[in-house]
Amino acid sequence: MGRLDGKVALVTGAAKGIGAATAELLAREGAKVMCTDVDETEGQKVVDAIQNAGHTASFMTHDVTSEEAWEKVAGETQRAFGGLHVLVNNAGIAPDGIAIEDLPFESWKRTLAVDLDSVFLGCKYAIRLMKECGGGSIINISSIMGLVGTPRSSDYNAAKGGVRLLTKVAALECAEAGYNIRVNSVHPGYIDTPLVRNVVERSEEASANELMGMLTMLHPIGRLGTPKEIGQAILFLASDESSFVTGAELVVDGGYTAR
């Protein structure tokens, strides 16, 4: 028996990194998984791999900043799989590091739209579906930057901090309404994903190798995390093993915030 047998899961940003690893883990544990992303080519590859392994998954192109797109994804997930029990709000961007005084307002709004507005929309439509299914689990991917400040990351810090508190509000509302829906946030440290690699390669402050070394040193455990390690934390929150966990912050950061 899989830990998610009989469950339906939706994973945003499922084409690469944490999203891809999470979709594969949830499917392996028995969930039917709707994978969404703006990258149709890579997203379909993830779904093909899941299906080739004998599990159930489907892909939809998804602009997570669009409420109309969320309505479509929610409706298709219900039509294809009969409901929704697990949402992983994973889609996000990591913008270039720019000081507040130089940050264009349009860049600020874009980061907040992708990294925070999308989580609000996901919670809104997931709650509507999950309460019809008798409950569920929403996992919002925040960051260590939702817990501690980092210079030249005001937009990202604000968005991820917003995800942290939005999660708590959603958890309280669902508990008070008796929906049997748990809502938690996951706070990864630096994870070796294409997103992080792209940020490192764009940096003008140091070479990619130097910057990767500096990031590694920030983690007392002595390395960056892997997408699978974050996926396993998400799997715990998605499963009934975490049935008494809601409104919580699961920090998976190799000791980054312990200093």
Image (tube, rainbow, N blue to C red):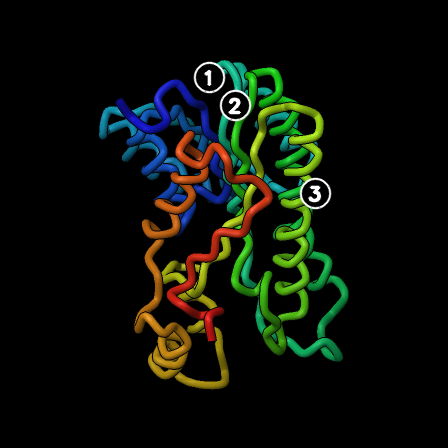
Q: Mark 1 or mark 3, which is nearer the start of the sequence?
A: 1
Label 2: element kind: loop
Amino acid at pointer 1: Phe
Label 3: element kind: helix
Q: CA distance from mark 2 to mark 3?
A: 20 Å
Q: Residues within 10 Å of mark 1 (few under 14, many from 20)?
A: some
Q: Which residue is mark 2?
A: 84
The single residue placed furthest to the front in the displayed view is 244
- Quick check: 138 above or below 221? above
Q: Residues within 10 Å of mark 2 (few under 14, many from 20)?
A: many
Q: In which image quadrant can residue 151 be found?
A: bottom right
Q: Please say if the residues under marks 1 and 2 sit with CB atoms less than 8 Å apart.
A: yes
Q: Where's residue 163, x and y in %?
A: 63, 51
- Quick check: 193 above or below 173? below
Is 196 placed left or right of 116 in the picture? Answer: left
Q: Which residue is mark 1?
A: 81
Q: Where's residue 114, x and y in %?
A: 63, 50
Q: Which residue is mark 3?
A: 169
